[in-house]
């Protein structure tokens, strides 16, 4: 659990699912995140973190582990009435800490607001850098597209991709 000022970031509980759905779908109206159903959120609640202020959930974000080294951050959403307080950034940093505790080495995400995620330590990359073109399969499976989105990554280890051992670099090699 991360606490700062009057905001606490914690793992989501099943009882948070309805509020998470409300926040995500409110933010989805502006196209910042994709809408989610209550069933989808409830079935993946273990991957969500929430920000709580005054006993009310005011933000959410999800961590989806893809493989033994990589996870995706999704559904970063803050109630419009609670924005500009650093809540989104706190949730992203919380999930990065969780991913690091899980032994993961890298995070990725798709976004229409790359400037925000750059301030959280992410860098824009060519989608081909992600292993085995799984990203294309993931996008097709979920009905998602790259339209207007940046693919971004953040290393959880001290050395960037270009200086990692050859075996790690091979994982990130573009597939022709």
Image: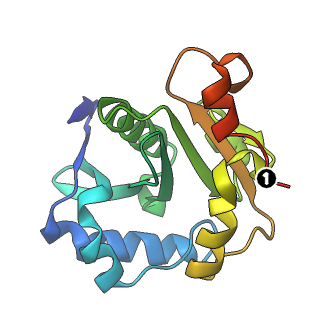
Q: Position of residue 144 (x, y in %)?
A: 65, 76
Q: Is 115 in front, or is 46?
A: 46
Task: Relative to 13, say whether 100 is above or below.
Answer: above
Residue that badge 1 annotates: 175
Q: Is 61 in front, or is 162?
A: 162
User: What residue is shown at x 62% (from left), y 28% (from top)?
Assistant: 167
Image quadrant where one finds the C terminus? bottom right
In-image side of 150 versus 81 (left or right): right
Q: Please, which residue is most extreme toward the right here?
A: 176
Decide if residue 120 is in sight here.
no
Q: Position of residue 114 (x, y in %)?
A: 71, 47
User: What residue is shown at x 64% (from left), y 40% (from top)?
Assistant: 171
Secondary structure, mark 1, is loop
Task: Relative to 115, say whether 169 is above or below.
Answer: above
Q: Residues within 10 Å of mark 1 (few under 14, many from 20)?
A: few
Q: Is 3 in front, or is 143?
A: 143
Q: Is 162 in front, or is 18?
A: 162
User: What residue is shown at x 15% (from left), y 61% (from top)?
Assistant: 13
């Amino acid at each position: 659990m991360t606490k700062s000022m009057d905001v606490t970031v914690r793992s989501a509980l099943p009882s948070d699912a309805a509020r998470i759905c409300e926040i995500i779908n409110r933010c989805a109206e502006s196209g910042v995140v994709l809408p989610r159903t209550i069933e989808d959120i409830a079935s993946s609640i273990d991957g969500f973190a929430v920000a709580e202020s005054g006993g009310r959930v005011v933000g959410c974000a999800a961590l989806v582990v893809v493989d033994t080294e990589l996870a995706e951050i999704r559904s970063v959403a803050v109630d419009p009435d609670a924005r500009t307080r650093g809540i989104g950034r706190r949730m992203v940093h919380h999930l990065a800490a969780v991913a690091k505790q899980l032994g993961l080495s890298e995070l990725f995400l798709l976004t229409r607001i790359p400037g925000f995620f750059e301030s959280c330590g992410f860098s824009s990359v060519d989608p081909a850098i992600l292993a085995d073109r799984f990203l294309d399969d993931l996008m097709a499976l979920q009905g998602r597209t790259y339209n207007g989105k940046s693919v971004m990554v953040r290393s959880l280890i001290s050395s960037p991709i270009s200086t990692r051992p050859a075996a790690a670099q091979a994982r990130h090699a573009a597939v022709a």
